[in-house]
Image (tube, rainbow, N blue to C red):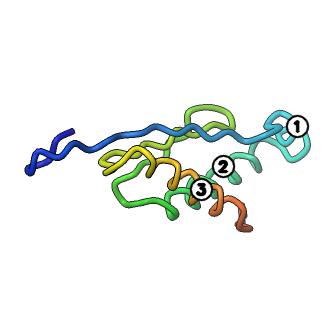
Amino acid sequence: MVDARGAEDVAAVLVARVSRYGELAATFGYATLDRVEDAMQAAMRHALRPIDAVHRIGEGAFAILLPGLKAGNLAALAAVRLAAALEQPFEANG
């Protein structure tokens, strides 16, 4: 991508996966795990810029799209922010 000044932006795609998805589903049920994934997706969206996107792409998997980065290393910073957001407790009521 090139902006009006001629500067190039970088886009990145990150993938996040829930560890031990099958074990968690067997223990808590798919309905509960679905609510947990919804809460995770909301927490990740909150940790990123409004232009970024978080999409569920499978059982326990998310694709995080980071368009318009000014430098490639900013994707690593976004990954750190995502990890920090998921370390915080969140509720998955339902």
Marks 1 and 3, Cα distance to the nearest angstrom?
26 Å
Q: Give the residue type that dot 2 points to.
A: Glu
User: In the image, is 58 to the left or to the right of 67?
Assistant: right
Amino acid type indicated by mark 1: Glu
Name the disc covering residue 37, or none: 2
Instruction: Please tell me which residue lies in front, 4 or 85.
Output: 4
- Which residue is more in the foreground, 43 or 31? 43
Amino acid at dot 3: Val
Instruction: Mark 1 or mark 3: name the one nearer the start of the chain.
Output: 1
Instruction: Choose mark 3 or mark 2, whichever is in front.
Output: 3
Circle 1 — which element?
helix
Q: Which residue matches tag 1?
A: 23
User: Could you give the CA–CA distance between mark 3 and mark 2, rounded to whole angstroms?
Assistant: 19 Å
In the rendered image, which quarter contains the C terminus?
bottom right
Residue drawn at x 47%, y 47% as measured from the top left: 75
Residue at figure coordinates x 14%, y 47% from the top left: 3
Which residue is drawn at the image coordinates 56% and 56% (left, top)? 44
Contact between marks 2 and 1 (CB within 8 A): the answer is: no
Q: CA distance from mark 2 to mark 1?
A: 15 Å
Q: Can you name the residue that lies furthest to the left here?
A: 4
Residue 5, percent from left and from top: 9, 51
Which mark lies nearer to you, 1 or 3? 3
Earlier in the chain: of badge 3 and badge 2, it is 2
Q: Pointer 3: residues within 10 angstroms few (<14), some, or many (20+)?
A: few
Picture coordinates of residue 2, whole percent (x, y): 16, 41
Give the left or right position of residue 25, taking residue 12 as reference.
Answer: right
Q: x and y percent of residue 85 in the render?
A: 63, 63
In the rendered image, the residue lying farthest to the right is 27
Please give the name of the residue rendered at 65% of the width and 56% of the height, measured from the top-left corner: 83
- The residue to which callout 3 is attached is 80
